[in-house]
Image (tube, helix red, strand yellow):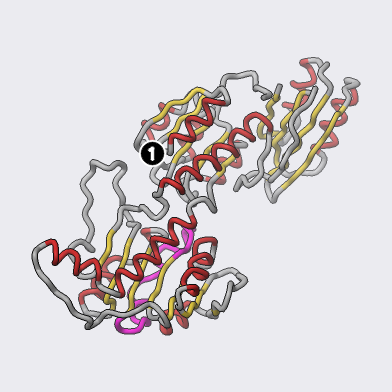
Amino acid sequence: MIMPEQKIKVLLLENIHPDAAKQFRENGVDIVNIDRSLKEDELCEKVKDVHVIGIRSKTQVTEKVLDAGKNLLAVGAYCIGTNQIDISACSRRGVAVFNAPYSNTRSVVELALGEIIMLIRGVFDKSTKLHQGVWQKSAAGNYEIRGKRLGIIGYGNIGAQLSVMAEAVGMKVYYYDLEEKLSLGNARKCDTMEELLAKCDIITLHVDGRPENRGLIGENEFNLMKRGVIFLNLSRGFVVDLQSLVQNIHNGKIIGAAVDVFPEEPNQNNERFQTELQQLPNVILTPHIGGSTEEAQRNIADFVTGKIIDFIYNGGTSLSINLPNLQLPEIRDAHRLIHLHENVPGIMAKINNILARHSINIVGQYLKTNEYIGYVITDIAKEYERDVIAEIKNIPGTIRFRILY
């Protein structure tokens, strides 16, 4: 393993699966582990000497936090969403951001399908009554999912996999997505969300956390739905107007609902939680556990940690959400120079001119850019003067420069 000059220190928050800490330690990294999220000021204190932050969905990585973390190289989101991270501020500082876009997909899909069955059969309410000693055996208002129309809003990794599983158990699947997505199986694409809302017996949300999705489902959208619809939100809390949802449960428009995400959620398990949805009939409430299975959390821990380790020790940025993506070979008998810069013309030429003036042989070189950032990796022969490093650091437009040994 090629080690950087400086000992790497990682801060892990929010009960990230222990496999992450284990993998970091096996690679010579110091770990600070905290089982909850931190408020901004507290986090600013903790990140002063930290190179990597690992978070889940609660911790906000703001520009103020990034300013405090002068040594930060990477942020790991041990979840799917990254709206809790100021991505543009990370990019301006050359801080790589990694997440786990696929690792918990199966877990969320299984929960959604299970809740659909529970809701359409009224299982949750019947179980509650039986715990209270009330025997209420009846077929009235209870249905099979076979043949029902499932409407999926958001046809990304989760929506698409739910589509396949739902069709396998006999449902008719419709979907709507802002982007053009290839339908899987016999799923039918709706041209508008309004078309899907009016057509489907069961509606489930699997959209991302972009600001445009705030208030996506409100009074107007509920009015378009069929009477007797079942409604699920396992995406983001702020995409649904809760008061409108409550009103439509009370008036019978929605006969069953499952909600896993909320506009405001506790920072830790011992905080009291309240919502307008409590004590409503045939409503399943879960504490943001869509991806909370042992399998998913282990997969997330392995995936994100592996990406961060590759970035720290090898310079690889494969599947980083903000830096140009490069998959690199291991360093062999060379120094690796990592240069992040504004995407302006001539940077590579300036790097190579500096190396040429100092008669330094280039063993290998790699370049990738995105709209804003350029990423140049240069492997050089071992002999070089310190003046070379100073010159490369001072190239106009440089965001960050580091050397791997």
Considering every residue shown, the one lying at the far left of the view is 133
Could you tell me which quadrant the C terminus lies in?
top right
- Tell me where residue 137 appears, x and y as whole percent: 17, 76
Image-based side of 156 in relation to 125, left or right: right
Q: Residue at x 72, y 31 (%)?
A: 338
- What percent of the width, then of the height, locates residue 327? 71, 42
Residue 316 rendering spot, x and y as whole percentages = 68, 38
Q: To which quarter of the image does residue 283 belong?
A: bottom left
Q: Residue at x 55, y 70 (%)?
A: 178
How many other residues sit within 10 Å of disc 1, few (<14), some (14-19) or many (≥20)?
Answer: many
In the image, residue 150 sits, relative to residue 50, either above or below, namely below
Residue at 32%, 66% in the rendered image: 241
- Residue 230 sits above or below residue 96 on the image: below
Tag 1's secondary structure?
loop
Q: What's the residue type where badge 1 is placed?
A: Glu
Q: Nearer the viewer, residue 182 or 127?
A: 127
Q: Is residue 233 magenta?
A: no
- Our reading of the magenta stretch's main secondary structure is loop
Residue 52 is situated, as x and y percent measured from the top left of the image, at: 52, 31
Task: Residue at 54% x, 80% y: name it.
Answer: 188
> Which residue position is annotated with label 1?
14
Residue 135 horizontal side relative to residue 197, left or right: left
Q: Left or right: 333 with respect to 208?
A: right
Q: Which residues are magenta?
A: 206-228
Was residue 219 drawn as part of the magenta stretch in this picture? yes
Of the pair 264 and 158, the residue shown nearer to us = 158
